[in-house]
Image: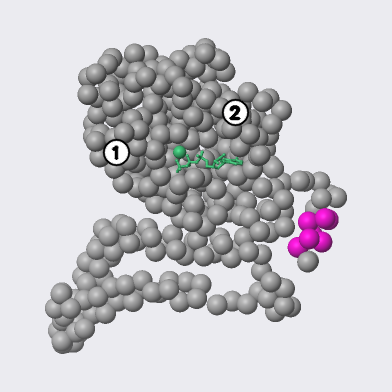
Amino acid sequence: MSISIKQLFGRKPKSSSIAKQRLKLVITQDRLDVDDRVMTRLHHELAEVLAKYFEFSANSVKMNLKQEGNSYILVADFPYTKFHDLNVRR
Amino acid sequence: MGKVIVVTSGKGGVGKTTSTANLGTALALLGKTVVVVDADVGLRNLDIVMGLESRIVYTSMDVIEKQCELSKALVRDRRVDGLMLLAASQKNNKDDIQPEQMKAICDKLRTTHDFVLVDSPAGIERGFSNASAGADEAIVVTTPDVSAIRDADRIIGLLQNARIEPINLVLNRFSPQLVGNGSMMDQADVLDILNIDLIGVVPEDSGVITSTNRGIPLVYEDASPGAQAYMRIARRLTGQRIPIPDFEQSGLFSNILKWFKKKK
Ligand SMILES: Nc1ncnc2c1ncn2[C@@H]1O[C@H](COP(=O)(O)OP(=O)(O)OP(=O)(O)O)[C@@H](O)[C@H]1O
Ligand SMILES: [Mg+2]
């Protein structure tokens, strides 16, 4: 979270700016929730890349958006069973 | 071939019916032929807002049930040429109508009129699907507050999925004073969030309430800021290019004033 000069000098931020900031966050979340396809695609593409390095079972994977302060964090759990030996790969 | 435009919002009470009544009347005043369709089955209000409540004989339900011809169910507004109302049934509910049936009505109306404006109920359920089923375009009405804007975003997503385009935004109940002192988002803020085209800003205007009391749409009161805003939107709907005025006070003096206000 960033602290603006205004906040440092003890002035309250305008409520309209707070509204805008909160809306932007919640709408990002709403859009992703509604459009499950985006998350599913991301899930598949991430799995494809990670599969080059790790072995994991597809149904143990969890992906979520988590709000922290002013931003969203993408939390992806890919519990792996084995690390591929990278020297074997060309 | 006329255009079918659904007037919708997601959140209730933000001004869909007020906008439909005023834009319909304004388009007729500009010489267009218009039908305003109440799609709020079970909670109809467009008739009373327009002052036509005493003249309703048939509703869209009667047309669907083949109790009467579509042309016979249209109530002519005698105050202006070319304006008709198709009322919603008050004794049925939204599930009694299928989206295809609404679409059929809209498709028929567009062959005889320049504009068909459909007043949608609030919500994202059946009432909304019925109202938007026959629409080519949409007008999304919102007020500048967090819940209305969030719901507008949801509706915009549904309209986009239904390939309804363009989707134009009406920002209603806008207060330059509140924007000036930082307690209301301005049009740039709202557009930044919703990312669709703005077709007009309607200020908070007590004339809306008094004109609704009388059943005479506000656009007949030339001097009122709300009426002027609706007339400008109607002109834009007909394809005229009219800039959206900046409702904020401008000029050096008011900017200095604003700067002082911000410091408070
Ligand atoms: N620009 C405005 N200035 C002042 N009052 C307004 C304005 N626009 C709408 N209103 C008032 O807000 C109330 C709700 O308006 P309206 O019935 O048009 O909303 P709606 O979106 O159709 O509601 P619903 O979701 O219940 O159908 C009415 O009392 C109306 O007079
Ligand atoms: Mg309404």
Which region of the structure is painted magenta?
A: B256-262
Left or right of B260 on screen, residue B57:
left
Q: CA distance from mark 1 to mark 2?
A: 28 Å
Task: Tell me where residue A29 appears, x and y as whole percent.
Answer: 39, 64
Relative height, residue A24 to residue B26 (above, below)? below
Q: Identify the subunit bearing mark 1.
A: B
Task: Tell me where residue A23 appears, x and y as whole percent.
Answer: 50, 61
- Check whether the beta carbons of the residues at disc 1 and disc 2 lie within 8 A of each other: no
Q: Main secondary structure of the magenta part?
A: helix
The residue carrying mark 1 is B93
Which residue appears at 22% of the width and 24% of the height?
B65
Are there few (<14), some (14-19), or many (20+) residues within 10 Å of tag 2? few
The residue carrying mark 2 is B214
Which quadrant is home to the N terminus of chain B?
A: top left
Which quadrant is home to the C terminus of chain B?
A: bottom right
Q: Is residue A73 visible?
A: yes
Which residue appears at 43% of the width and 73% of the height?
A67
Relative height, residue B154 to residue B227 (above, below)? below
Nearer to the camera, B150 or B127: B127
Q: Is residue A45 visible?
A: no
Task: Tell me where residue B169 appears, x and y as whole percent.
Answer: 50, 41
